[in-house]
Image (tube, coloured by chain):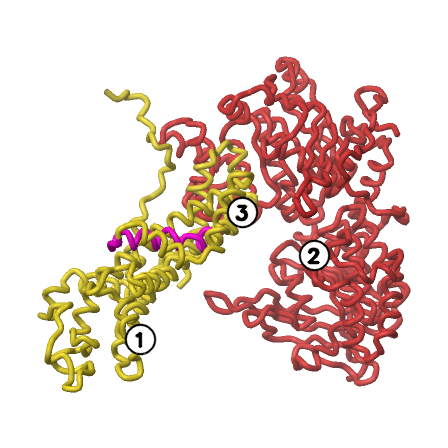
Chain colours: A yellow, B red
Amino acid sequence: MTSPIAPDLPATGRIPVKPRAGVWRRLVKRPLALIGLVIVAVVVAGAILAPWLTGYDPNEQMFDGLTLEGAPLPPNASFWLGTDLLGRDLLTRILFGARTSLIIGIVANGVALLIGTLVGVTAGYFRGWIGGALMRFTDLMMAFPALLLAICLAAVLQPSLWIVAMVIALVNWVQTARVIYTETSSLAEREFIDAERTIGASAPRILFRHILPHLLPTIIVWGTLGISTTVLLEATLSYLGIGVQPPTASWGNIIFENQTYFQAAPWLVFFPGAAILALALAFNLIGDALRDILDPTQRGRA
Amino acid sequence: MSKGATSKRTGAPAPAVSVTAGPVLEISDLTVSVRGEDGERPVVSDLSFSLARGETLCIAGESGSGKSMTALAIMQLLPQPAARISSGMIRLHDMDRGDIDLAVLDERRMRRIRGARIAMIFQEPMTSLNPVLSIGRQLVESIEAHTGLSRAEARRRAVEALKAVRISEAESRLKQFPHELSGGMRQRVMIAMALALKPDVLIADEPTTALDVTVQGEVLELLRDLQREHGTSVILITHDMGVVAEMADRVVIMRHGRMVEQGTAADIFSRPQADYTRELLAAVPRIGTGVGRQKSAEQKSVEAEMPGSVAVVNDLHVRFDLRGGFFGQVNRRVHAVEGISFSIAPRETLALVGESGCGKSTTAKALAGLVPYHGDIVIGGRNLAGLGRDQRKAVRRDVQMIFQDPYASLDPRMRVGDLVAEPLLIHGIGSKEERSQLVAALFERVGLSADQMELYPHEFSGGQRQRICIARALALRPKLIIADESVSALDVSVQARVLDLLKELQREFGIAYLFISHDMAVVENISDRVAVMYLGQIVEMGTRDQVFSNPRHPYTKRLIEAVPVPDPARRRPRFARLDQEIPSPTRKIGEEPPKLALKDLGNGHLVAVS
């Protein structure tokens, strides 16, 4: 039974902030952000609905998919984006590839971002031996060739999409950690952080309520940059035979399989490349808009 | 253009000093506008004044009055592309070629005028010097660029210029880099650079605001001497009426981009015409007016009821290790605070004064728990050293802090209402509704309205933000508030109101203040007791009257003398310069600074004896 006199305090100890109800509404009001959202929606829908969209099997090598000389077909009425070297429909492969690439670009990249941010923030705020140890480890990771590390990890573990995603996350957090570390250590010097400490704020409170919001712009930029990096890293791993196993399609391995034929069949590289670019751009547009919307000092500015 | 036409416009009475000819610079109907989100907005409107040869004209006003914009407009250095001169003329009188209108001059020809004919020095000497070039190179290059002298010749001129600003060992100083010099030295280098080309007009934009008082005195005096020698006309832009009184022949008072009043310094100070000028002068803190702080009998009885001190500091040491060398071992130490002791009684204001680097802010930080220290800090009878983390947090509730810069000390991403509620939340006080009521009450108490709780810090002015900081500090009903230079960044009129608020709150809630400041006039106005710090130690401590009317330590005397008096009739006698700079508190390991012993001169007036 609750006491009628003292209404209970929220156990989490959060300040009652108005819910960010306006964020979505403000996001869709911006034309550029809307374009980004539409692109992401299209890619996600394409990935989910892939089996029903084209009527081809992504891995089926079709006789009518090649010319009589055995060369791939350019875009035409029956194969909208053309066919690849083995006579498979490119559009179907890109749609199925979106499944892999979205997982890599969003999950692997997201995990990398999370690790990088946590390491960077902790090292930047606490300094001392914790910070020193974390950053030396980061430097070590940076100096060690990421690809070699990924190969080692992938060789030890059984290759599967999720393992590839994890491997990519484990090698890709380093740059983020470095950048976040630098920014956190300069934020920690700001006077308002001292002011928080004088009112008795605990370290987690300062980190999550006062430092993290200021890091948002950086995190967003690194997050969008990471999409193309991770998608391409997955392609590299696939190419080396330790990533997604053929014939499973991913945007990266479509490019990798076909890049030597770029001059003869440019569409084979152009379309998956455009897909990666569009996805990264879409997240960038959304991220940009989010950064402005979440920054109160930008309020009221177009 | 005839001289007759120009001098007719000069309506102001001739100043007392020797003014040899007509105006060098004449500004008529100058309007500067800035393009913003909501169209163009004038920041300087219809400003007209003239500057006679050899004259010092002070442009005084509070922040946002357009005084700096005027200077930048003269130099054609307005921030591009937002700001522009929308109308008016800036005429520079040229002996050979007649008058030039700078407002319409193209960039190439303007470049030849900048530095050579009109030079400018800025507020922050560190940012106006290039940190990676030696001062010699910067000086020599600026001379070469304008004169076509040979390298050797330019170097000789540079040495001469440094000697003129009384920099010792000028030759070897040329090799030094800006960071190797103190603030005062850097500003002198800037002056040397500005005067090396013997310009007709020197524009100094808040040249001493970033400097310590004693250094400010020296720099101002230097400017005055150089002006007398070279006959340079000076436009001095300042918010400090004390500096105006010290330096000005004539004064232009500006507000909101418009001229409020102009006249000779004597007229402005003794017979101000405009209401605003009167308000501005009334708000200036003056030494010798700190009346009303004498304790009434009633207050004394309250103190008797509340025995014991709010805070006792005993033999406090704060040292920072500097690492160097290949293995990053500790090789030097900054002795920021070296064994100071004091106590603060309830309802008392103890002022800690001294110049930058004397350790006063470090003392505050140690007390607020922001830096590790040695020694004893006892708050409310409990020694912090012996307490666990939770207990320490509870004791710390009683000590709150207000920082210097109200722009930097509030998290820009939080609503101000949440910021003020935060201390309550952290210490688990009240329910959500109770907290928001409490915060609303606090807002009203510090002179803001409760509707403003939903806004973000950047939507407030500097004075309002400082009120928010005060509300935040008050939220936990502390026994002691540390105010670290809390009014230094504010305009005088705002400063006076914030000081009044602090005094009111003290009466109402019985708070004790540790008031840290470099400004002796403000300190005299608010404090009960004063402690003067020098190089991490207290050199003199006593009641306000003891320290201000009977200063015993030479450093205290210097500090008091250095404060510019806001009355041109009472310009101080020549200021005795120190032969050397204040020594650095950084020492090698094992090298302990000499410990000063304090002697009681009676009634608790302590003075260091050496």
Spatial CA distance of label 3 from label 2 is: 25 Å
Say which chain tag 3 marks.
A
Say which chain tag 1 marks.
A
Place of residue B49 in the rendered image (x, y in percent of width and height, measured from the top left): 73, 68
Q: Nearer the viewer, residue B548 or B312?
A: B312
Quadrant position of residue A41: bottom left
Q: Are marks 1 and 3 on the same chain?
A: yes
Is any part of residue B16 visible from this angle?
no
Residue type at numbered disc 3: Ser
Magenta-colored span: A159-177
**Mark 1 highlights which residue?**
A259
Q: Is A174 contained in the magenta span?
A: yes
Q: Are marks 2 and 1 on the same chain?
A: no
Q: Is A178 contained in the magenta span?
A: no
Place of residue B223 in the rendered image (x, y in percent of width and height, measured from the top left): 83, 59
Residue type at numbered disc 2: Glu
Spatial CA distance of label 2 from label 1 is: 57 Å
Spatial CA distance of label 1 from label 3 is: 43 Å
Say which chain tag 2 marks.
B
Q: Nearer the viewer, mark 2 or mark 1?
A: 1
Left or right of B136 on screen, residue A31: left
Labelled disc at residue A185: 3
Q: Nearer the viewer, residue A263 or A4?
A: A263
Labelled disc at residue B124: 2
